Amino acid sequence: MRWENLSDGPRQGTADAALFGADAVTTRTFDTPEFAGITFHEIRARSILNRVPGASRMPFEWTVNPYRGCTHACVYCFARKTHSYLDLDTGIGFDSQIVVKVNAAELLRRQLASPRWHGDHIAMGTNVDCYQRAEGRYRLMPGIIEALRDRGNPFSILTKGTLILRDLDLLRQAAAVTDVGISVSVGFTDHELWRTVEPGTPAPERRLDVVRTLTGHGIGCGVLMAPVIPFLGDHPDQLRATVRAIAASGATSVTPLVLHLRPGAREWFMAWVGQHHPHLVRRYERLYAEGAYAPKWYQRRITRHVHELAEEFGIGPTRAGAARRIRLPEEPEPATGPTQLTLL
């Protein structure tokens, strides 16, 4: 396993790119059913603010990732390639070898206080889920949110986890002083599909309960309908059922995103297709023959259909960078004015 030059991207060839040294790693396992077969590598990171490459399609420039690897075990996860930078397996290893940056909160607080930091928006949950099961034990997110709240630094969170509700009070406090965006990922409501492609995640209806709870407490929450999986989750009836459930949850928006298959994820996903749906292998090879993304015509068709359904059920798509206003629930103390909430 290669710890010495760990970075958040491919090796740069210098020790300066390392986020921590090999002598800073503590490896643990826990004898509890929810962590059976999982190994945690606790490290003290040297940096926690990650700059997104300029060529990225992401609508944000900075991220914070307290974990690497994810027990959600989604077979399509695009972040699988990051495990190869550690010489770890991008398949089972990604699902079961979890790197935990135990000093994430204190490091973030220090970096936010630097005169070189200008208060840019920070996105979380865009690589691996910051509310995966490990967060229940390590509790890194409360300290991270507190650091962002105390500096009034705008941020957003994308999650499939229900554990975010543990931090509801902190999120409300942060939303009172800065732009906060919350999105929950629900690509489909088909239970058979969920059990096979997202085996470590809460059920779709539980995630939609998170949306319902957040909006009920004055924190607008959008849904990233991702991924829409070709041939398995894109039937018109499936799309209709999913958008109807999203609308019923009170989501402020729904934004569809078709499955993309980057290197690392592509091999693992295609192996899964070959095992569970061998008749679809050739269809996937043709659809993704040009690279990681489905053809534009297919993406546009899905997007148009979902937006039509969203309009029918009374919700709309999120524009990139759009902000939505929320009002915090009334309290005995005089309430502050409305604040803006920036969604992913």
Image (tube, helix red, strand yellow):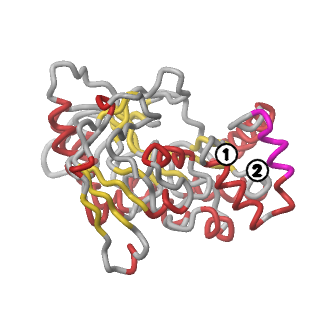
Numbered disc 1: secondary structure: loop
Picture disc at residue 57: none
Residue 30, horizontal then vertical, whole percent: 31, 74
Residue 267, horizontal then vertical, whole percent: 67, 51
Magenta segment includes 285: yes
Number of other residues with Cα within 10 Å of mark 1, as a class: few under 14, some 14 to 19, many 20 or more: some
- Is residue 152 shown left or right of residue 18? left
Residue 319, horizontal then vertical, whole percent: 55, 29
Residue 205, horizontal then vertical, whole percent: 54, 65
**Decide: marks 2, 1 in contact (CB < 8 A)?**
yes
Residue at 40% over, 69% down: 38
Q: Which residue is mark 2?
A: 230
Give the overall secondary structure of the magenta segment: helix
Between residue 283 and residue 11, name the one nearer to us: 11
Task: Report the magenta residues as a range.
Answer: 282-290
- Up-down: is 204 above or below 108? below
Between residue 159 and residue 43, name the one nearer to us: 43
Type of amino acid under label 2: Pro
Magenta segment includes 269: no
Quarter assignment of residue 262: top right
**Disc nearer the start of the sequence (2/1):** 2
Between residue 216 and residue 29, name the one nearer to us: 29
Picture disc at residue 259: 1
Number of other residues with Cα within 10 Å of mark 2, as a class: few under 14, some 14 to 19, many 20 or more: some
Residue at 44% over, 35% down: 9
- Is residue 331 shown left or right of residue 75? left
Residue at 20% over, 19% down: 116
